[in-house]
Amino acid sequence: MTKKILITGGAGYIGSHTLLAAVGQGYDVAVIDNLSTGRREVIPTECAFYEVDLVDKPKVEQALKEFLPDTVIHFAGSIDVRESVENPIKYYANNTYASLALIEACVKHNVQRFIFSSTAAVYGNPDGGTVSETSPTFPINPYGHSKLMTEQILSDASKSHGFRYAILRYFNVAGADLRLKAAQPTPMATHLIKVACQTVLGLHPSIKIFGTDYETADGTCIRDFIHISDLARAHLNVLDYMTEYDASAVFNCGNGQGYSVKQILDAVQRVSGINFKIEHGSRRAGDPRSLIADTSCLRNKTGWVAQHEDIDEIVSSALAWERKILESASL
């Protein structure tokens, strides 16, 4: 059985939730994070912590030698589509090059399993909007390209060196741990639900919709939203599958249903009971019209089932977290 997991980016949003889920299931977990966006306080005291940048090969290798993980779950990286268009070199450095360095170190130190945090952005702007793992991959922004390159590196390295890997393609991740132990830590994050909740609380004077002329029912982009706790569990279900079947695989991680930007803003106003100012702007470069996950592969192979599908519940947990942050700041 897998016993020791090293998590990169374990002080960040998805990494911290997966860390807490893994510790809760009895795994021995260590964390690598450079704390550029993550928060040290979310890492339990019983977990070994290495404040290391992934391109610092000697320090990464030292962590691997000390902790001796049999599995690495790799979250660390940059995730803002708009920023990737404006600063692509940063994304190829933080996502592709850093991942290559980590994979190289894992091969050298005989890590048996590698789970990679990828993205639905690898699908680009698909016809019909709903995609399975076998759908064509045509990224339309550097963020998607940087992740797809890493997927290819993993596939090729696995064939040559024999380790197993899983690629998890995330759709839109939202919400917070229902016990409010962890959530999106970055104050200036660009996630739609987070920004909308901050607008409810008066941290922004308004929120802008980027593009109202898409070929959708209300003219705004459509996305698939998955609750962060459901996504964290998916990693451990996938790890169980890899261990039991000694297999590599690719999985979509979403809820299988789409909501438009306008529908999400309606949900935030409905849950909060507060109407806020909404502005309309032009389309952003790199934004696809619609992205919805076919999650049948994840469900059928690993037994994963979403426990928090309701969009109002997702929004409610995100809003509760933002209120907690605001209350803590005022003390």
Image (spheres, rainbow, N blue to C red):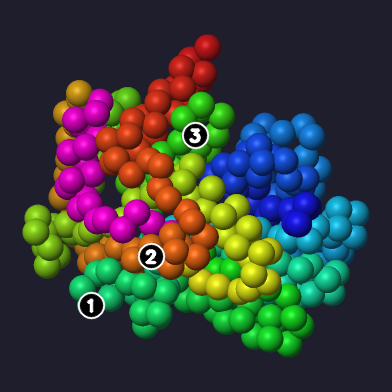
* Up/down of 88 relative to 280, above or below: below
Q: Position of residue 241 (x, y in %)?
A: 60, 63
Does the segment drawn in magenta span residue 258? yes
* Up/down of 72 relative to 23, above or below: below
Amino acid type at circle 3 is Asp
| Labels 2 and 3: the sequence-earlier one | 3
Q: CA distance from mark 1 to mark 3?
A: 34 Å
Residue 268 falls left or right of residue 172: left
Amino acid type at circle 2 is Ser
Disc 2 target residue: 296
- Residue, x 85% and y 63% (percent of image)? 61
Graded by Cα atoms within 10 Å as few (under 14), some (14 to 19) or many (20 or more), the crowding at tag 1 reads few
- Of badges 2 and 1, the one in the foreground is 2
Amino acid type at circle 1 is Asp
Q: Quadrant of the N terminus?
A: bottom right
Q: Are marks 2 and 1 in contact (CB under 8 Å)?
A: no
Residue 52 shows in this picture: no
- Of badges 2 and 3, the one in the foreground is 2
Graded by Cα atoms within 10 Å as few (under 14), some (14 to 19) or many (20 or more), the crowding at tag 2 reads some
* Up/down of 60 relative to 44, above or below: below
Which span of residues is magenta-colored?
253-272
Q: Main secondary structure of the magenta part?
A: helix
